[in-house]
Amino acid sequence: MIPSGAAASTVRRRSLASRAVGEGSAVRRMDGVLLVAVVALSVVGTLLVWSSTRTWSSAEGAGLVKKHVLNLGIGGALLSAVAVADYRWLRAYAPAVYGVALLLLVAVASPLGSTVNGSHSWIMLGGGFAMQPSELAKPALILLLGMLLAEPAEGTDRPRPRDVTFAMAAAGLAMGLVMLQPDLGTTMVLSVITGAVLIFSGVRKRWIVVVLGLAAAGGGLVWSLGLLQPYQVARFTAFINPASDPRGVGYNSTQALIAIGSGEFFGKGLFHGGQTTGRFVPEQHTDFIFTVVGEEFGFLGAVTVVALLGVVLLRGLRIARQCEDRFGALVAGGLVCWFAFQTFINVGMTIGIMPITGLPLPFVSYGGTATFANMIGIGLLQAIHIRERPYG
Amino acid sequence: MSRMRTRFVVVHLTVITLLVVLGVRLWQVQVVRGAEFVEVATETRTRDVRVPAVRGQILDSVGRPLVRNRTALVVSVDRNRLERLPDRGSAVLARLAAVLGADPVKLKERIRPCGPKVSRPCWPGSPYQPIPVDNHVSTRQALQILERQEDFPGVTAEIQAVREYPYGSEAAQVLGYLQPVTEEELERREGLKASFSGVDLIGRDGLESVYDQELRGKTGLRRVQVDRMGKAIGVEQQEVPVAGDTLITSIDAKVQSIVEQALAGAMKKAPQADGAAGVVLDVQTGRVIAMASVPTYDPSVWIGGIAEAEYQRLLSDKAGKPLVSRAIKGTFAPGSTFKVTSVSAMVADGYPLKGTYDCPGAYMVGGRPFHNFRGIGLGPMNLHTALVKSCDTIFYRAAYEMWLRDGGRKPVPKPKDPMANMSRAYGFGKATGIDLPGESPGRIPDRNWKRNLWAATRAQNCVRGKTGYPEEKDAARAAFLKKLAYENCVEGFVWRAGDAANFSIGQGDVLVTPLQLANAYAALVGDGKVRSPRLGWALVRPDGTLVKEIKAPVIGKLPIDEETRAYIKDALSEVTSDGTAAGAFNGWPMNVVKIGGKTGTAEVYGKHDTSWFASFAPTNKPRFVVVVMVSQGGMGGSTAAPAVREIYEGIYGFGKFLTPALQEPAERLPRIKPDGTVQR
């Protein structure tokens, strides 16, 4: 029977838009709660970037908030693209993605790289745009580790020792390159990611102990050989005793505490934070953006932002748990640990319970490459959520 | 997959724990300790900038400004900021000196803080204030500095009010001057700290000092928000400064000018003269119409910091210590002008007012002859003539008799001391209480005073009485000094007959200020009441509303009856026509305005005579008392009296003066209109 023309055309010629948002489409199957939380964080972040940079002169880069919105737009596109794609397809390309990330990190070390704020972490793209390859290395590493460790050994649910070794070597390569920049914070994120994916993959407890031991030994070695830059040592000293150097390294943590504390319960209101307006906290639009939340939105706002981040993390974990595909679960778990670590370190350092480490607050801080990486991460989580049953 | 699930659960719990940790810590920081951080934040984020109030003007009795403000572009240097530069600001100062056309070394000296080992040029104010280094900069210079702030960190150019003295050096000591407030003053004076701005000045002398609080107004406060570089980014809170009150004085600028010129002229005519003072009082109110002291100086030298050489010059003897007002701080023997108190004392002590007294050429006091002026005997006369002709021996005799009645060298328990007590009743021997700082009380010597002096100087006198004065070249003088020292050692505490006699004609140890003498004469020829004179007449707000009228309070009454007062006044009224000042007032139109007065020629050991003339006019109903004193000026009738005549000529418009300056003292305050201008 030949269907009537109108009905046939309706079935066959569903527009792209209607297919994207229509019944049973990828978008419809996205984790709405996760998406709303990320959008909310992005909106809050935009307001905070606006507030913290609105008094800047043109020489300092006035209108940074517009760039932030553009970054978010690009990030949103990346999120959608990744979410709609079948992540299992990415599995095949994981080594290639990781290879590109490593190449970029090498490029940073080469004369192509540039130094900003003492970190040789940037590639200048011209036109005021710059790229920070270490940010992209985070999701790339997660994909690679997921790919390597998803395949269990014959008859077990643990990865093969060969794969574990290979995974650690690959991760070590990226960490080494990042450490050279030097970017201690990102190195720590990469090691946390590696450790997390290894643990999720089901390696034996003794492996975990060995990895932790190696990490401790490596840390001790780095410290005792004096491989850390003096400022990095100073940051830890200042964390233990902020009064030791109130005008130097301790300045940041002291000023951050003052800004957040002075917000009290309800905050001073958007654009009304005196500490923010006076720019007493350095890097307040990037690593220290949480001080702006604290001052201008008070305890209520700060807890709300932490709660939104908590929603992202817990929804991410839910996706990881529900995923029946080992690759998807590992990737989701790795992503959650990445965001969790960065959230806790970033917020913790502004309220004096963590040492100062140059890490942005996910979805809130200003930063192009970081925003893209975060959005790709959320895109991956959505993609995994959409296809949580491998053959469904 | 189950193992993976277990591990996810562990991570789940970890994440929740960490989130709770963050939340608890946020509660602790923002809610528990929030107030504490708010305080710290306010401290780091704001700077309190004090906005100086415009200082009130000082006007004369018809509203002419004696001290006013002009706006000036003032360049200031913040020493603290310079110190923090790598080269401690040397380069900045060098650039600044180039722009200002100043010597960089001198500029550097000027901004160093004064200290025990650092003398002028230096900065006497607080080290935390911006230091004004130039208040005569052109707009172009100011722009050079303001437009290149990166080249001039710590240097500012601002419009500030600067004192201006339209009459130059006239009444300089009366008006006083301003200096930066010092740290010690800020600490010492309660409440001062809060009301002072960084660059505030404090009145240091004269009216500026006495009425400092009223003139100063109330400093405004601007709480400025700053960024972490200290750059101002907005005003958080503002208290508008309240301009200081205007002080209307009873000084008449025209009369003041006349007095200044008369004194300067008298100094010129008497070649030995080393200083002079003139006081013009309003007899009926006790207000000061003019008060001058020469040598004088231009108070504008203080503006913006005084140069070391200038400062030393002002303090030097060679320049005649122009900072010192001889009218209130200079003490001199009053000579015969003092006889009005002696006559009063005699009458009060029972000597007949209209009796006849002999005026021999000399009178023996305690075995020693005391001579009339030039030793001339004038025969029997009444007290009237004694004053007009200035006989001395009548007063020697009276003083000697009083001294004897008090027990002579061995005084009775409660000596009457009629002359000393009468002079005190006239206000001598203690400060008049005029609204000026540092007034001298003068000195009324008596038995107590001698005893105290003896106690204080006995040790040295006794040594000198034995060892003599070997360093003195003149043998006769050395012998005299030795004898004197010996006498003072042995019996210096005794109030001798000679002391009493000298006192009666205003000689010996009695010292008065020109103001005291003028005030005493005002009481004598006015209503018999002694007042504490006042320069300030009223304080008004800049818009003209009256804050306070200042009156010269009555502080005593002369203990003599009306008849005696009228008698003395009548006698003094003839001095200018028939007495010792007749020469000076030769040709004065007595039929228009009759002038009374008394000359004084006081001998000063080792110096030329002090020339005095104390006067009043018109004699029938006195309105003015004019006193002129010329130190080392010679005879009262030949130096001081002509100067007084010149002052009256100016006041009434005679002689070289075409128009009268002030027929009568002003009776109503000048009206200041709300816009600050004066209605004449």
Image (tube, rainbow, N blue to C red):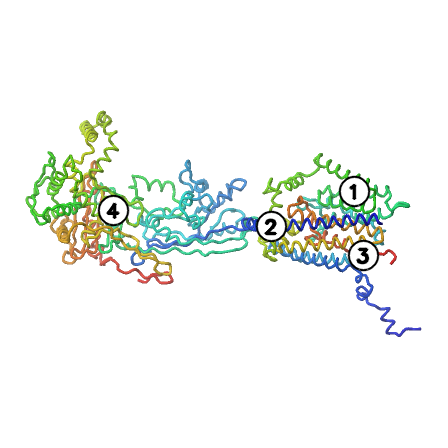
Seen from the viewer's position, the closer of residues B401 and A278 is: B401
Whole-Å distance between the Cαs marked 1 and 2? 46 Å
What residue type is disc 3 on?
His
Q: Residue B306: x percent and y percent?
A: 38, 44
Within-10-Å neighbours for mark 2: few <14, some 14–19, many 20+: some
| Left or right for A47, reference B75 | right
Within-10-Å neighbours for mark 1: few <14, some 14–19, many 20+: few
Numbered mark located on residue B277 in the image? 4
| Label 2 residue SS | helix
Residue carrying label 3: A385
Q: Chain of mark 1?
A: A
| Label 1 residue SS | helix
Q: Residue B235: x percent and y percent?
A: 52, 55
Residue carrying label 2: B32
Mark 2 and mark 4 on one chain: yes
Seen from the viewer's position, the closer of residues B295 and A17 is: A17
Mark 3 or mark 1, which is nearer the start of the sequence? 1
Q: Residue at x 80, y 45 (%)?
A: A199
Mark 4 or mark 2, which is nearer the start of the sequence? 2
Seen from the viewer's position, the closer of residues B438 and B532 is: B532
Q: Is residue B117 visible?
A: yes
Residue carrying label 1: A173
Q: Residue furthest right?
A: A1
Whole-Å distance between the Cαs marked 1 and 3? 30 Å
Q: Residue at x 19, y 40 (%)?
A: B609
The mark lying in front, picked from 4 and 3, is: 3
Mark 4 and mark 1 on one chain: no
